[in-house]
């Protein structure tokens, strides 16, 4: 008989950003081959599955014993230890072994033994203990109730004094505190008591509700609200249009990060004096929540307006020396020192006066009251203040965008000035940290150096900078950047791993050149000539390795008429920078050469000449890609 399984871990509210990882871990529970389903609200983590067996089947276990050569006494001792008669032992090769029959067990009993460790084994960024002192179980938040059932039977265990049962809890304000459930009616009973268990349904409901009220879409905020509500509903509020005199970025920041409100636009890019809030209740029939939200937002906007006015009395240009009081990193000094290095690097990269001015002012907003309050606006505020204080638009825009790209999905700065400043800022951080030994290891990356490196790669590629990687980095940092380049072209741009390996092994010059060669390989690969030619290049490479051949000069007089002279003429006719399509078209001559010509000829001079020709041809075309890295049909790598 197959049974349904249900596990609910009821807690105090779990931080929203930790829930997806916990669900991912719970989805890997071994439930006897049954498909594992998981979901969550801020107050509960839920696992359910159908088709679990009532008992595990009987099985046989083979226990390896002592060597036969150790004698009868050893065999008797082994049998006694296993609780068996020596006559039941059998010989397997040079060893005794015992086949033990293992009786199946009730799955409910097995789960009662294993689930506590599985629950407490969830990895959280931090945990707490809430009863019994430091030696008590730890979890992300206090566990208040647990439902654990197999069919209609409770799976009995307890954690920190909380025993399992068949009683769950509804919404804090709109549900019953005690609800009897089974695996079959669990979700329906929660819904009756103000809880939408499905996070997908909550997400879709929020999206539909806010869209109907005219809110601007915001995927990150939508995800946050999905996991801080159990019964979401949206309301629209208003604020005084006078606040629209403040930059939209400031108003949106206040609404989004401080209040978790969605902004409303009257036209694309133009804020309207409204906001949309998402409640954790069925609605606000009396409008009291709306009034409260409007009052709180008004106070926040007043703070922002005060910070804006105060900051204007001290222009960015006057704040440069103040950066000496702001620490960048203990071993790397202050932000003033970082600014000086960045300005110098901008000059090296060919930045003009606007780029140098932007680099000088880029970090000055760290000393402003606005950024101290709204830290996520650093850079943005600097750009807005630069514009308001009469700096050139090129300077203002470069400051505004110099932290970009913040992720692989983000865009690079839109101007050359901004790209140079962003590149210099990130390179200075990478060089400085690597020079003092602050190198990422494993999952640890406290200075977000992987993100900085990805930003450098993305800017170099997409802005097509004519800058060679070895001129920008060296040593461990060069190797680190190579890893980020591989990641970018494989995971972000979608090139196959062997294509990336082949192009990078042929040499890394500018990343624009790497991109062009990758595009060529990917474009030509599906053609019928490419893989056979790649296989031939591998063959050439192996021949040269086996001969330990380091290169030589081809003597055209020693070339045999026919396939050998034909191949020599064909590849010599191609330019050094010939398109890969033309190289692939050499396949017929290469095939004919290997069909008719013996490379390791008995005559030493002829053999040397043939190896020289193959070496010359390989050198010429290996500037595009190392074709020995290409996985051809039938190969496994």
Image (cartoon, grey):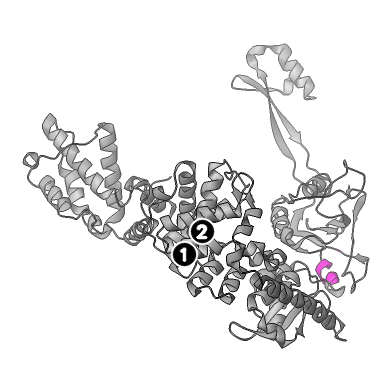
x 14%, y 48%: residue: 568
- Residue 187 in magenta? yes
Disc 1: CA contacts within 10 A as few (<14), some (14-19) or many (>=20): many
Of residue 33 and residue 518, the one placed in the foreground of this image is: 518
As drawn, 97 above or below 17: above
- Circle 2 is placed at which residue position? 455
Quadrant of residue 235 in the image? Answer: bottom right
Q: Position of residue 157 (x, y in %)?
A: 88, 48
Which of the image's four quarters has the C terminus? top left
Q: Residue 403, can we see it?
A: no
- Circle 1 is placed at which residue position? 355
Of residue 159 and residue 111, the one placed in the foreground of this image is: 159
Q: Residue 117, can we see it?
A: yes
Q: Is residue 344 left or right of residue 141?
A: left
Q: Which residues are magenta?
A: 182-190
Give the mark nearer the N terminus: 1 vs 2.
Answer: 1
Are the residues at dot 1 and dot 2 in contact (C-beta closer than 8 Å)? no
Q: Position of residue 256 (x, y in %)?
A: 70, 72
x 67%, y 19%: residue: 66
The mark lying in front, picked from 1 and 2, is 1
Q: Is residue 561 left or right of residue 617?
A: left
Q: Position of residue 87 (x, y in %)?
A: 73, 20
Q: Is residue 634 left or right of residue 57?
A: left
Which of the image's four quarters has the N terminus? bottom right
x 56%, y 63%: residue: 362
Tell me the element at label 1.
helix
- Residue 68 in magenta? no
As drawn, 533 above or below 420: above
Spatial distance from mark 1 to mark 2, Cα to Cα? 18 Å
Tell me the element at label 2.
helix
Of residue 364 and residue 58, the one placed in the foreground of this image is: 364
């Amino acid at each position: 008989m197959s049974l349904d399984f249900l596990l609910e871990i009821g807690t105090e509210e779990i931080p929203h950003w930790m829930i997806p990882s916990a669900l991912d871990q719970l989805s890997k529970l071994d439930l006897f081959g049954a498909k594992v389903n998981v979901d969550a609200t801020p107050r509960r983590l839920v696992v359910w599955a159908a088709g679990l067996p009532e008992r595990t089947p009987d099985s046989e276990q083979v226990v390896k014993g002592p060597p036969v050569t150790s004698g009868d006494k050893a065999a008797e001792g082994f049998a006694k230890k296993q609780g068996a008669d020596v006559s039941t032992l059998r010989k397997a090769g040079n060893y005794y072994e015992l086949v033990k029959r293992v009786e199946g067990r009730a799955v409910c009993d097995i789960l009662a033994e294993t689930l506590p460790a599985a629950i407490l084994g969830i990895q959280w960024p931090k945990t707490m203990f809430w009863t019994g002192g430091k030696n008590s179980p730890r979890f992300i938040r206090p566990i208040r109730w647990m439902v654990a059932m197999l069919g209609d039977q409770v799976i009995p265990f307890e954690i920190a004094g909380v025993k399992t049962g068949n009683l769950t809890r509804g919404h804090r304000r709109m549900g019953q505190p005690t609800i009897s459930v089974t695996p079959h009616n669990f979700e329906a009973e929660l819904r009756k008591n103000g809880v939408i268990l499905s996070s997908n349904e909550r997400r879709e409901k929020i999206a539909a509700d806010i869209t109907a009220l005219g809110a601007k879409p915001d995927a990150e905020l939508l995800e946050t609200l999905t996991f801080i509500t159990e019964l979401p509903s949206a309301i629209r509020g208003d604020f005084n249009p006078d606040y629209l005199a403040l930059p939209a970025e400031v108003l949106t920041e206040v609404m989004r990060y401080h209040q978790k409100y969605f902004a409303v636009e009257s036209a694309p890019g133009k804020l309207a004096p409204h906001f949309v809030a998402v409640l954790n209740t069925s609605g606000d029939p009396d409008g009291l929540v709306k009034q409260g939200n409007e009052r709180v937002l008004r106070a926040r906007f007043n703070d922002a307006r005060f910070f804006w006015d105060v900051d204007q009395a001290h222009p960015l240009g006057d704040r440069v020396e103040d950066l000496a009081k702001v620490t960048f990193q203990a071993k790397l000094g202050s932000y003033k020192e970082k600014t000086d290095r960045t300005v110098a690097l901008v000059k090296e990269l060919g930045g003009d006066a606007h780029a140098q001015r932007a680099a000088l002012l880029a970090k000055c907003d760290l000393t402003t009251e606005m950024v101290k309050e709204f830290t996520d606006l650093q850079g943005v505020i600097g750009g807005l203040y630069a514009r308001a204080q009469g700096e050139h638009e090129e300077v203002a825009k470069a400051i505004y965008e110099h932290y970009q790209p913040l992720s692989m999905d983000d865009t690079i700065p839109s101007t050359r000035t901004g790209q140079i400043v962003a590149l210099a800022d990130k390179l200075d951080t990478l060089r400085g940290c690597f020079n003092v030994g602050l190198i990422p290891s494993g999952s640890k990356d406290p200075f977000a150096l992987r993100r900085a490196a990805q930003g450098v790669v993305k800017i170099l590629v997409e802005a097509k900078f004519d800058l060679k990687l070895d001129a920008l980095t060296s040593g461990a940092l060069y190797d680190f950047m190579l890893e980020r380049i591989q990641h970018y072209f494989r995971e972000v741009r979608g090139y196959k791993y062997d294509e990336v390996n082949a192009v990078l092994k042929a040499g890394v010059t500018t990343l624009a050149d790497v991109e062009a060669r990758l595009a060529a390989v990917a474009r030509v690969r599906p053609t019928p000539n490419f893989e056979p030619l790649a296989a031939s290049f591998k063959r050439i490479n192996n021949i040269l390795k086996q001969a330990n051949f380091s290169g030589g000069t081809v003597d055209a007089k020693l070339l045999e008429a026919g396939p050998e002279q034909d191949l020599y003429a064909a590849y010599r006719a191609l330019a050094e920078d010939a398109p890969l399509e033309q190289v692939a078209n050499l396949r017929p001559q290469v095939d004919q050469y290997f069909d008719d010509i013996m490379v390791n000829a008995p005559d030493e001079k002829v053999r040397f000449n043939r190896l020289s020709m193959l070496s010359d041809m390989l050198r010429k075309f290996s500037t595009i890609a190392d074709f020995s890295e290409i996985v051809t049909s039938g190969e496994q790598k």
